[in-house]
Image (cartoon, rainbow, N blue to C red):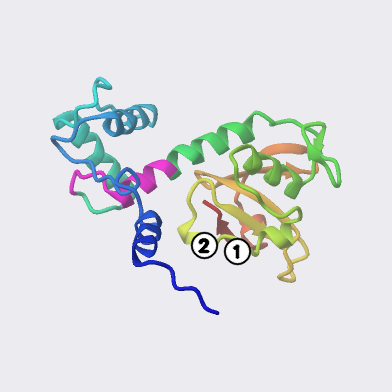
Amino acid sequence: MRVKLPAIILSIFFILALPTIAQAAILREGSTGTDVKTLQTEFNQEGYTVGPVDGIFGPKTKAGVLKFQTDQGLTTDGIAGPVTQAALDRRTKTQEIISTAKTYLGVKYVWGGTTPAGFDCSGFVQYVFKDQGIILPRVSKDQATVGTAIRYKDLQPGDLMFFSMNENGVVSHVGIYIGGGTFIGAENAGVRVVTLDQYWISRFVVARRDY
């Protein structure tokens, strides 16, 4: 026998499935409260000076939002809506990933290595991303199948870059793009920052964005 759920139960289920107000918060000039304080803290940490962290979305906070939106190629309306907040969250996480990766500069290369005692290329990437709560597959060819595919010209810091060292299109190496035409990865000489010269560009296969 089929049991029909009372309409009130279905209504409650539907409401609980909706985003909360906090999740969908849109902050603009005149907004106040804890969400504004969090926004101001993040902008100050990222170098977009918005004045004191007072929980008041005033002219200085709006100016910081506008500058950030311009730098990120977003709609410049001075409103911290979902798109702007997502871009800020990604920038913050990117800085944390790059900072974490750089703490392992000089760590030796070990084939199959997945710890600071020694890394291989995919073990290094997996370890750094896991530290930020992002779980990736173990080997580079599998890592190259997750996330959003990104073209070379659209690279942003934090994207993973995949290479075919045999130049046959088969992924066999990975590094973390850190901007300025460079990536950080576990190479034969250990963890180091590498310049994307013609050698690497000719072996590039795809990039992936995982957060």
The residue lying at 19 percent from left, 36 percent from top is: 62
Q: Are marks 1 and 2 in contact (CB under 8 Å)?
A: yes
Please state if 23 lies on the left or on the right of 154 as rendered. left
Label 2 sits on a secondary structure element that is: strand
Amino acid type, mark 2? Ile
Where on the picture, by quarter, is residue 190?
Answer: top right
User: Mark on residue 150?
Assistant: 2
Q: Is residue 173 magenta?
A: no
Mark 1 crowdedness (10 Å alpha carbons): few <14, some 14-19, many ≥20? some
User: Mark on residue 206?
Assistant: 1
User: Mark on residue 99?
Assistant: none
Residue 136 spot, x, y in % from top left: 67, 52
Amino acid type, mark 1? Val
Distance from Cα at disc 1 to Cα at disc 2: 7 Å
Q: Is residue 87 magenta?
A: yes
How many labels sit on residues? 2
Foreground pick, 39 / 62 = 39
Classified by dominant secondary structure, the portion drawn in magenta counts as helix
For the N terminus, the image quarter is: bottom right
Per the rendered image, the range of residues in magenta is 77-89
> Which numbered disc, 1 or 2, marks the residue that appears first in the sequence?
2
Please state if 40 lies on the left or on the right of 121 as rendered. left
Mark 2 crowdedness (10 Å alpha carbons): few <14, some 14-19, many ≥20? some
Label 1 sits on a secondary structure element that is: strand
Please state if 74 lies on the left or on the right of 194 as rendered. left
The residue lying at 75 percent from left, 53 percent from top is: 138
Where on the picture, by quarter, is residue 114?
Answer: top right
The residue lying at 14 percent from left, 31 percent from top is: 59
